[in-house]
Image (cartoon, coloured by chain):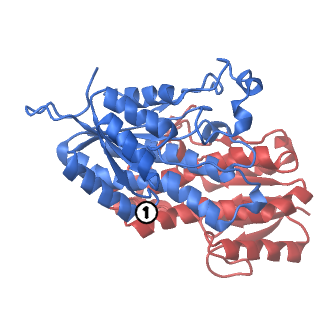
Chain colours: A red, B blue
Amino acid sequence: MSVLLVTGAAGGLGRALVERFTADGWLVAASARRDGEFAADAGDSGAIATVVGRVVERFGRLDLVVANAAELRLAHVEQHPLEDWWAIVRTNLSGPFYLARAAAPHLAEAWGAIVFVSSEWGITGWPLASAYAASKAGLIGLTKALARELAPRVRVNAIAPGVIDSPQLSVDAAAAGIGLDEMKRRYAETAPLGRIATPAEIAATVAFLASPEAGYFTGQVLQPNGGTTMA
Amino acid sequence: MTIVGRAGAEARPPVALVTGASSGIGRATAEAFAAAGYRVAVNHRGSAAAAAALARTVGGRAYRADVADAGAVAAMVATVEGELGPIAVAVCNAGFYEEQPLAEVSDARWERMLRVHLGGCFHVARAVVPRMRARGEGSIVTVASELALVGGVGVAPYVAAKAAVIGLSRALARELAPLIRVNVVVPGPVDTPLLPDRDKTPAYARTVPLGRIGTPREIAAAIVHIAESRWTTGQVYSPNGGLVIQ
């Protein structure tokens, strides 16, 4: 059986990833900040390395890591508390780097793959999201560098999804001072397809990248975003 | 030539702050802004003699600060504005290059790479944005690298940091419009001390569609141009000899 380690497993997309890969017959090591055998702060280099070691010890191999854990807080660039800004970069960009570094030898052994979960905002930028957009754009660079460095044994790709129907939307709505439905409507109308994404369909994009059908994909960024960006 | 900055009756020249200006692209950029009529704040981290000599040549002043240090950058920006006047253009150029296999990159090297490149731009933006906002205008130019667009072997931290600079610049372009413009220059291989020797050979030059590596002056010209292009924000200019065409 193939083994997946996914971070941010308690979030909206994280839960969908766990469900999808479990249904597809994978052994899933679900890592979240709290609780469970594989709990870790996704930005903590030592904790991440420990979790990778534990997964390999427990399941004997590692075929896929999905770096999905992320933080998002909106603030004006000059008012964003410094520590807070760097904490977002730590979780969203340094954490995935530490994860890839720890997992790479095991993935190479298994001819495995890495999928980094970036974001549409990492491609387009977004007001008040300087730390988030920078870190998600950095992930796209990391994808391309590691795709070259770890080829041919490890394929490295990213997804840059549009807005997903997830608990984060309630946070966004509260920050904007509007209701959840209004928040969803506003996001939906920015996409030609006229709606936001379901977690399951984004998980399906990751499942595709992980599958043998995507065996010739590396260094690529897939953008399930309802058509918001077309480049 | 267009001058970004206020057309004040006192005809005080506008000020350009260039980080990492003691050598390479930064040095050429300081010279180019001086030639375009700016007073230049020449930032450096430790190359005091080179920075002072350049400042004398271009009629500006040298300022020491590590761009990875937010407090040092904020203090520098305050000093520059006190001594030279309002900063019309800030160029976030300071950087370094290193190659290491993934397995050998220590946490400290990864962190330093992010702090200097991404942090260098973030810290400068943080310091100049409230001042530019209060004045109703300003222009920020960040310097990334073609490697951010195409990746490379043994350079994951550098590529990630430079790609993050592009993302930061796009986010800030949206956030700070219409008062402050933010753009990125993404140079290809340029004849500077940072370029590995293997990329300074005729054999390498033949791999570049335009047949040679770039000069610092050519990158500086792109930086001055984009800094002064008043209907341009959130854009990426790629003077790279055609090495990346996408």
Quadrant in the picture for the N terminus of chain A: bottom right
Q: Position of residue A63 (x, y in %)?
A: 85, 59
Can residue A25 be spotted in the picture? no
Residue for badge 1: B69
When the figure is inspected, residue A53 is found, relative to residue B115, above or below; the finding is: below
Q: Residues within 10 Å of mark 1 (few under 14, many from 20)?
A: some
Give me the residue at 87% from left, 45% from top: A152
**Farthest residue in the top direction?**
B210
Q: Nearer the viewer, residue B51 or B152?
A: B51
Position of B114 with respect to A58 (left or right) is left
Q: Amino acid at mark 1?
A: Asp
Residue at 85%, 54% (x, y): give it.
A112
Identify which residue, B36 or B184, lies in the foreground: B36
Q: Is residue B114 above or below residue B224?
A: below
Front-most of residues A65 and B143: B143
Residue A113 position within the rendered picture, expressed as x and y whole percent measured from the top left: 81, 53
Q: Measured along the vertical axis of the image, is residue B50 above or below residue A79?
A: above
Q: Position of residue A84 (x, y in %)?
A: 44, 68
Q: How many marks?
A: 1
Q: Is residue B167 visible?
A: yes
Tell me residue A157's x, y (percent): 72, 47
Q: Chain of mark 1?
A: B
Q: Residue at x 43, y 26 (%)?
A: B221
Is B74 positioned to the left or the right of B195 in the image?
left
Quarter of the image where the C terminus of chain A is located = top right
Q: Nearer the viewer, residue A131 or A31?
A: A131
Element at label 1: loop
Location of residue B60 by image quarter? top left
